[in-house]
Each structure stands twice: as structure tokens, then as C-alpha cells.
Image: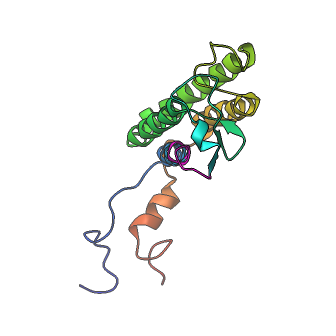
């Protein structure tokens, strides 16, 4: 086989659309946050981590109130994002619906007192504003990320050089 061959047998065959790649990255980020919520030191006052409820005294990065339930929700959301990243339509759906859910969580946080029994996740003011940013960001990404790679990008993946063969 010559050095100019375009055989793809030894190359990875996975080419993700931009929206799928975005969903994958967002999902991995949520997985990381879920795991970090269980790491003492990264989560301050780890000994005060409770199963659920506003009385959990643990804070991810010393800022965001977390509980076991909160961390498990991040992990589940991350798994969902990674799983749905496989297909373009479901990746977009994950970003849009997930973003709307985070906007709903932001409203929930604003409407619920931090020390209320209704604050079962739990969320604090820092979580509330993070949820607003996540919600807006995910919805925008779901709306603006292209569903397909451009022709130039697809050519770059197939040829032996970035733009095909150099003459």
C-alpha cells in the first residue's frame, strides 16, 4: 500500500456532527461534575454531604451546594448526554430539552427558599445562576450548532492531507 492511499481501515470511522460533538462534550462535563461532587477536597465540607435536602452542607468547589441526589442527577444527565450524542437529532434534543429543564430549575431555585423543605435537590443562589447560564447556553447551542460537518471538513477527514492531495 503506498503512502498516498486513502484506505480508512486503520482510521477511526466515527465522524460526529458538530451538534453531536457538543452534546458529547456537555454530557462528559456533567459526568465530571457528578464524580467531582463525591471527591473530598473538591467538595468542601464533604462530611456534611447528605442524601438529599437543603440541610446538606457540602459545596462543590466551595460554592455550589450538593447532595448525593444532586451528584447522581448530574451523573444521570451526563450519561444521557453521552448516549444521545450518538445521533444528530437526539443530540439536538438533549441540548434543547436539557436547556429548558435547567431554565425550569433556575425558576424553581428562585421561587424556593434555600432552607425550605421543598429545596430537596438542594440548590443555593450560586446554583440558581449557574442553572440560568447552563439553560441559556444549552438552548443556544441546540439552536445554532450545525447538524452536519461542512463539505470541506468532510473532505479533510477523508484525504491524506487537510485539503486532499497536494500537487
> What residue is at 52 percent from the left and 42 percent from the top?
34
The residue most toward the front is 47
Decide if residue 53 is on the left or right side of residue 156: right
Give 129 or 14, whichever is nearer the viewer. 129
Image quadrant assignment for residue 85 = top left
- Magenta stretch encompasses residue 29: no
Image quadrant assignment for residue 127 = top right
The N terminus appears in which quarter of the rendering?
bottom left
Give 128 or 44, whichever is nearer the viewer. 44
Decide if residue 118 is on the left or right side of residue 35: right
Image quadrant assignment for residue 14 = bottom left
Residue 138: horizontal and vertical position, in percent? 61, 35
Residue 136: horizontal and vertical position, in percent? 69, 31
Residue 98, compared with residue 1, is above or below; it is above
Q: Indicate how the structure is coloured in the image.
A: rainbow
Decide if residue 142 is on the left or right side of residue 149: right
Tell me which segment is drawn in magenta: 33-41
Residue 60, compared with residue 158, is above or below; it is above
Give 2 or 75, whichever is nearer the viewer. 75
Give 66 or 34, whichever is nearer the viewer. 66
Residue 125: horizontal and vertical position, in percent? 76, 28
Decide if residue 133 is on the left or right side of residue 13: right
The number of numbered discs placed on residues in the rendered structure image is 0
The residue most toward the bottom is 2
> What residue is at 55 percent from the left and 48 percent from the top?
36
Residue 39: horizontal and vertical position, in percent? 54, 50
> What residue is at 50 percent from the left and 60 percent from the top?
153
Amino acid at each position: 500500500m503506498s503512502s498516498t492511499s486513502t484506505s480508512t481501515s486503520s482510521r477511526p470511522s466515527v465522524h460526529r456532527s458538530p451538534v453531536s460533538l457538543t452534546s458529547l462534550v456537555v454530557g462528559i462535563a456533567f459526568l465530571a461534575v457528578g464524580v467531582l461532587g463525591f471527591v473530598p477536597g473538591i467538595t468542601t465540607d464533604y462530611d456534611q454531604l447528605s442524601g438529599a435536602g437543603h440541610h446538606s452542607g457540602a459545596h462543590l468547589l466551595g460554592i455550589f451546594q450538593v447532595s448525593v441526589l444532586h451528584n447522581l442527577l448530574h451523573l444521570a444527565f451526563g450519561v444521557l448526554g453521552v448516549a444521545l450524542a450518538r445521533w444528530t437529532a437526539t443530540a439536538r434534543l438533549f441540548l434543547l430539552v436539557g436547556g429548558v429543564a435547567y431554565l425550569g430549575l433556575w425558576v424553581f431555585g428562585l421561587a424556593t427558599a434555600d432552607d425550605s423543605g421543598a429545596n430537596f435537590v438542594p440548590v443555593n443562589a450560586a446554583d440558581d445562576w449557574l442553572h440560568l447560564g447552563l439553560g441559556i447556553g444549552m438552548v443556544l447551542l441546540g439552536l445554532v450548532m450545525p447538524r452536519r460537518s461542512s463539505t470541506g471538513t468532510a473532505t479533510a477527514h477523508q484525504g491524506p492531507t487537510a485539503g486532499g492531495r497536494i500537487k
